[in-house]
Image (tube, grey):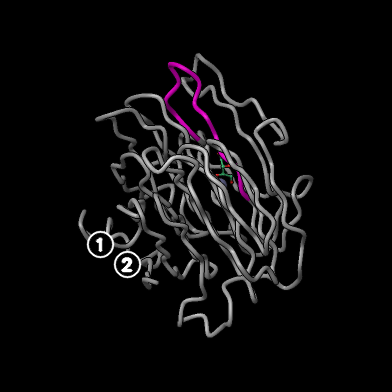
Amino acid sequence: MLNHRTADDISYKSLDTTGLRDRFLLQDLFTEGQLQLVYTDLDRAIVGSAVPTLDTLTLSAAEALRAEYFCERRELGVINLGATGSITVDGESYQLSHTECLYIGRGSKEISFTSADAAEPAQFYLLSYPAHTDYPTAHAKIEDANKLELGSKAEANERHLYQYIHENGIQSCQLVMGFTILQPGSIWNTMPPHTHDRRSEVYAYFDVENDHRIAHFMGHPDETRVLWMSEKDIALSPSWSIHCGAGTGSYSFVWGMGGENQRFDDMDGFPLSTLK
Ligand SMILES: O=C[C@H](O)[C@@H](O)CC(=O)C(=O)O
Ligand SMILES: [Zn+2]
């Protein structure tokens, strides 16, 4: 497991492009035949990927966790960003097609990942936080999610947000997770932007068309920086940072949060007039 440190809300201002990208952007996490984990300092989030091909991939506790098994003191949310695959949790198998979700509760011991077709593998995106109690493992399809229709065509930010793991959905200790699909012709997500001092957030962009890019904005609202991102790049958003983006083409992104509370609407919005 790689260890990763973001920068604080003062030092990010003086980082150059490479420094900023090293601190706030995770790339190349999705590699065929590999399970990769990154231990971040954002509310102890572990961000990871599993792309099984011919062989099953097994999740084990990294040495850094000093745990017998990965979910000994953790919960794990998974969304499949690739083709159909299965996750087995303590002998129970769940089949996930593209954009489906599995919540894996604390105490789950044996967790493994397979693809239905090695030539077109599943690409499991993993997000885990420390957990204080056990909630049941639960599978959700897109029709099980709470769907919010946000934005407008006129503002080029028409998008559908699907909540999987949240206060009124799959129960968890701190993880809140789902994904957002931009509607055709709309490019802006999360506009006007917000922070939530009580939670940090992780954005994983996917279904970005070939050669297209997302300009992801971060930082204090009056001191923003941009990260140019491509397919399956991941932006780390500390609690003090805004997080929003515009794509040169259509795209979707998984959002996931951990921290002090789970109230989705506990956000501090910033009017566009305050952005710099
Ligand atoms: O705190 C909530 C998160 O930033 C996202 O859920 C926002 C989002 O997906 C969107 O507006 O499209
Ligand atoms: Zn947010």
Q: Residues within 10 Å of mark 1 (few under 14, many from 20)?
A: few
Q: Residue at x 47, y 37 (%)?
A: 83
Is residue 187 a member of the stretch shown in magenta?
A: yes
Q: Is residue 188 left or right of residue 255?
A: left
Residue farthest toward the bottom in the current orientation of the protein = 66
Quarter the N terminus occupies? bottom left
Total numbered labels: 2
Q: Is residue 209 above or below residue 32?
A: above
Q: Amino acid at mark 1?
A: Ser
The answer to whether residue 265 shows anywhere in this view is no
Residue farthest toward the front in the current orientation of the protein = 54
Q: Amino acid at mark 2?
A: Ser
Q: Position of residue 183 (x, y in %)?
A: 50, 20
Instruction: Tell me the SS state at disc 2.
Output: helix
Mark number for residue 274?
none
Is there a contact, CB below 8 Å, between mark 2 and mark 1? yes
Mark number for residue 11?
2
Q: Residue at x 27, y 61 (%)?
A: 22
**Residue interval drawn in magenta:** 177-189
Q: Position of residue 223 (x, y in %)?
A: 36, 50
Quadrant of residue 77 within the rendered picture? bottom right
The quarter of the rendering in which ligand 1 is drawn is top right
Disc 1: residue Cβ within 8 A of ligand 2's nearest atom: no
Q: Residue at x 50, y 33 (%)?
A: 191
Magenta segment main secondary structure: strand
Judging depth in this view, the residue of 40 and 87 nearest the camera is: 87
As measured in the structure, the alpha-carbon distance from the residue carrying label 2 to the one carrying label 1 is 6 Å
The answer to whether residue 24 shows anywhere in this view is yes
Mark number for residue 14?
1
Q: Position of residue 206 (x, y in %)?
A: 42, 38
